[in-house]
Image (tube, rainbow, N blue to C red):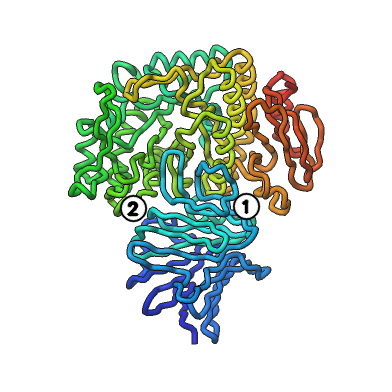
Amino acid sequence: MSDYTEHEGGLERRTADEILRVEPWGPHAVRVSATAGPAVDPTLPGALDSPATSPAVDATVSLLPDGRARLVNGRITAHADADGRLRFTHTATGRELLAEKRAYTWYPGPRVYADGRVEQHFEAYDGERVHGLGQHLHGRLDQKGHVIDLVQGNTVATIPFLHSSRGYGLLWNNPALGRVELGADITRWTAETAAADRIDYWITAGDPAEIMESYAEATGHPPLLPEWASGFWQSKLRYRTQDELLAVAREYKERGLPLSVIVSDFFHWPKMGDWRFEENEWPDPAAMAKELDAQGVKLAVSVWPTLEPDSENYAPLQAVDGLVRDGARDGEPLTFEFPARGHGADLQPMAYYDPTNPMARRLLWQRLNDNYRSQGVTAFWLDSAEPDMPPALAARALYSTGPGTQVTNLYGLYHAQAVADGLRAAGDDRPLTLIRSAWAGSQRHGAALWSGDISSTFDSLARQIRAGLNVAMSGIPWWNTDIGGFNGGDPADPVYRELLVRWFQYGTFSPIMRLHGDRAPNHPTFSADMTGGPNEVWSYGEEAYDILADHLRLRERLRPYLTELSVQAHRTGAPPMRPLFFGFPEDERAWEVDDQFLLGPDVLVAPVHEADARTRTVYLPGECRWLDPVTGTLHEGGNRFDATAPLARIPVFVREGAPVGAAFASGRKDGGAGGPA
């Protein structure tokens, strides 16, 4: 007789040591929940807030006479052995997708419950390729063989969802600090400080597009991209006054250059945590926003989650328990030192608002609404949203939803939700926030993740290409980098100018195109007065300017295509920026290419990420033909060759007959980036 029983359309197994549940969770997907405790707690925070139900869910459960059981849900079948080990196969073919690890002699089974730690063990497979897992700067697209820490940080965004070349996607639905080890003999997920001895994962089956669609069904579909967001964003560290920012926007207009967004960076406020403009430097925000709006330009403002003790919002947040507390100081507000106005290089203690507290989220939005939105500002940049603090300090944090070791990874998700909820309540059904952190499900709140304070080198550019593709396979469609890198870069240096041009060309085809950075000459101290050198498209010399201006115009012509990709992302979860294997999973060589990408189904981009390179190897996938819009030459898919890459352009190809080819044809007519160099 089976130890399994049918439970709410799925399976349940209860023993003296464990409760195990296997249930359908959306079309073609299964959720596994297990605990060594007295009950499975459905209220613990995660990405699977409510059952993903759909008319397409038509699961069947079988209890077998030999003690085993089986659950079939569309493309995926879960096989439960008599000893509690699970195995997942493709329903139609019976091919094994993933199996929990068999126990060794005297070795625990696939699920391990220890003091302050849980582990989930899976079999490892030769030849498997693993993608996703958020944003990491190790420079690899295929992460097999790596150990990935499940922590947040500046330049690191952990999203515990992986895509496997074996035809499955797996979400580790636990926000606790931990890691995943993608070894040759085992795949092991670990939560070091797991709440209630909880193991929780979700698995789906299909080709890459089907997997991403199932993931969106389970964790949330991204909203449509606002029309304004698909154009060019201008930013730098930092525009210090209203006049300085408006002068830059006016210069773009006078030169006839497309501009969609201009950004006011940090320290535009009186005190950290006031969440409003400082009156002397920004005397009339409403007039500023009105002038920009008349030019078709959005003003975006930086919002930090940190507060000075004497800021306007510190006491109101403290009154609703809306500040992160310090477990080592009897629950007093957790603080970390950062620059503040009037203190020069002397750093001051800053507290953190707690977005896991719904009242704190509502208070934040109310201030943003009163101080920015009422002035015409509706675009927000949520910086330092990890939150940015040393690991030892993060381990002491206490949040409304639990200890930091268990829930810190959720910070960016809840922070984005605060703004998305507010915008939606105000009638905006396309919320978007530029943010430096994300977790599973952040896409449903319109998170536009960027890669943080990265280096300004060709090596850094190469790493961004792979990182962006892994973010795409993590369910976040809107991703971007600081074009040119953040840390450094001298606009007068010919070597850096080449890097800036190559990065700008890559950014032209990125989901969001944003120029930002701390350029030379830099401010000598880390203080509230800091600002970097010029960082506009005319800051890099005449040769660079002509190339950058051409690419701005090309980006403008591509915006209707990006609107189409936004609809695809919203409906199906398909990312605009895609690895080659996403569009051509049947092409084995497409799985090997990690420094090219597809922009939607019809544009193939091969960035140049080496200094002085004027050619690069390109692989064109599939059984179709690809047009070189510069030469008009058609190339057969399935071929690899050396493409020319003069400084004026990078190799880009368009699928034969695709309507988006007209954007490049226009460039040939007006001498723009789509035309001959």
Judge depth for marks 2 and 1 and give the one in front.
Answer: 2
Q: What residue is shown at x 27% (from left), y 30% (from top)?
A: 274
In the rendered view, tell whether residue 662 sits above or below residue 636: above
> What mark, if any, has residue 675 been given in the picture?
none
Residue 546 in the image, given as x and y percentages of width and height:
63, 16
Q: What residue is shown at x 53% (from left), y 48% (from top)?
A: 475
Nearer to us in this view, 435 or 541: 541
> What mark, if any, has residue 209 been given in the picture?
1
In the rendered view, tell whether residue 514 sits above or below residue 655: above
Residue 353 in the image, given as x and y percentages of width and height:
29, 41
Q: Is residue 307 left or right of residue 242?
A: left
Q: Is residue 591 left or right of residue 267?
A: right
- Asked whether the viewer can see residue 179, the reply is yes
Amino acid, disc 2: Thr
> What mark, if any, has residue 405 been given in the picture?
2
Q: Earlier in the sequence, mark 2 or mark 1?
A: 1
Say few, some or many: other residues with alpha carbon within 10 Å of mark 2 (under 14 / 14 to 19 / 20 or more): many
Q: Quadrant of residue 168?
A: bottom right
Nearer to us in this view, 72 or 638: 638
Amino acid, disc 1: Ala
Q: Secondary structure at mark 2?
A: helix
Nearer to us in this view, 563 or 538: 538
